[in-house]
Amino acid sequence: MSFALNLPKLSFAGVGAIEDAVAVLNQQPIKKVLIVTDKNLIKLGLLDKLTQELTSYSIEYVIYDEVTPNPTVTLVRNGLKKFQAEECDCFIAVGGGSPVDCAKAIRVVASNEGDICEFNGVGKVTNPGAFFIAINTTAGTAAEMTSNSVITDEENKVKMVIIDGKQIPDIAVNDPTLMTGLPANVTAATGMDALTHAIEAYVTPGAHTLTKPTALEAIRLISKWLPVAVDNGSDIEARDNLACAQFLAGMAFNSAGLGLVHSMAHQPGATHNLPHGVCNAILLPVVSKFNAETGPEPFRAVAEAMSGNTFDLNDKQAADLAIELICNLSVRVGIPSGFSELGVTERDFDGWIDKAMQDPCLPGNPRQPSPEEVMALYKQAL
Ligand SMILES: [Fe+2]
């Protein structure tokens, strides 16, 4: 079987990306745009440049700003009603993972028969749907260029993961000027999420010649620029490099897959509503150590990318160094050292093990753990 590299048709990165994306949109035969976002981003003025550009081209738009973190089935259904009632024929998502995922899901149900719950899983989407621009406002999830959306089915208390290349936006936009207002703790968490994407995508057996270089470059850029952006959020060079880094990490993991860090991190994220990037950052050194015990080789390149140096070390020593560098970066950007600092206790782990073992990210891990090993890893991360 060949390797599939899934990407948006077009991506704009850098200052001016929004203007360039709207100029392309203006060439499309569209009548009215549904902008999917949240109220906070409007308050922060992050839609101003977009709406000015749309107005300058006389492109009609209407805003759906109801999106909340962990978007729900109800939000998707309400968004569909608005899309249809307003007779829209195009989507622009503005935000991090939540608005972008919500827009992906609304677009699916706007152009395919059935309720959003019927699309849970892999490859269930038939029609890609309306023209779609995703404008990223954080440097972490890479949702603006990936093929999955995560929607909470609040009735059945299930986090659905809809995975289909047809969900990839037509245009991905990364304009660093939208990211300068992100607080330091969010910058740190989203940056460590992107680092986790890159490292998991590099060490997975699913890694390919087409994805390994982008993963390593993401690791290099995040190691260099994340501390700079955490110290000075308005450093546009740091923001630009981090936006590119998370996009590169997205290029890698969207096609190569993720691993045990994500499958374990999804559980405290769901039960304690902890930031996804923080959960990943806490688990990344613990799981990397576990993976390196049976396969240290790929961690040499991780250590080299993180430090910018090559080392006269054996594989085991190089892997140990990579794990030390990950821990150092976490401390440097202010990530908590363990889950106990976030209100988690050992009693919480029992409910997490089965779900972590069934998580769709687990098969991508280079070493398949037993439930007992997952429990031991959670304990190490406490
Ligand atoms: Fe992630």
Image (cartoon, rainbow, N blue to C red):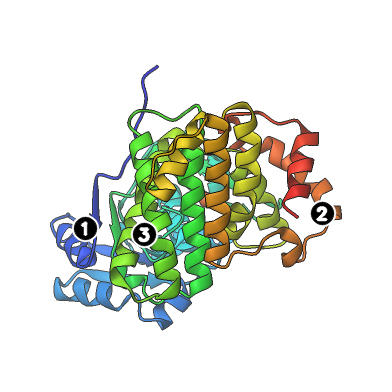
Front residue of 167 and 109: 167
Q: Are marks 1 and 3 in contact (CB under 8 Å)?
A: no
Residue 124 is at least partly visible in this image: no
Q: Residue 195 at x, y = what percent?
A: 47, 51
Of mark 1 and mark 2, the one earlier in the sequence is: 1
Q: In the rendered view, does 90 fall on the left or right side of 307?
A: left
| Residue assigned mark 2 | 348
Query: Can you say whether 14 is above or below 193 in the image?
Result: below
Determine which of the numbered discs, if any, sits on residue 30 in the image.
1
Mark 2 burial class by Cα count in 10 Å: few <14, some 14-19, many 20+: some
Residue at the spot 26% in from the left edge and 72% down from the top edge: 50
Mark 3 burial class by Cα count in 10 Å: few <14, some 14-19, many 20+: many
Residue 290 is at least partly visible in this image: yes
> Is the distance from the Cβ of mark 3 to the nearest ligand 1 atom less than 8 Å?
no
Residue at the spot 70% in from the left edge and 41% down from the top edge: 356
| Residue assigned mark 3 | 242
The secondary structure type at the circle numbered 1 is loop
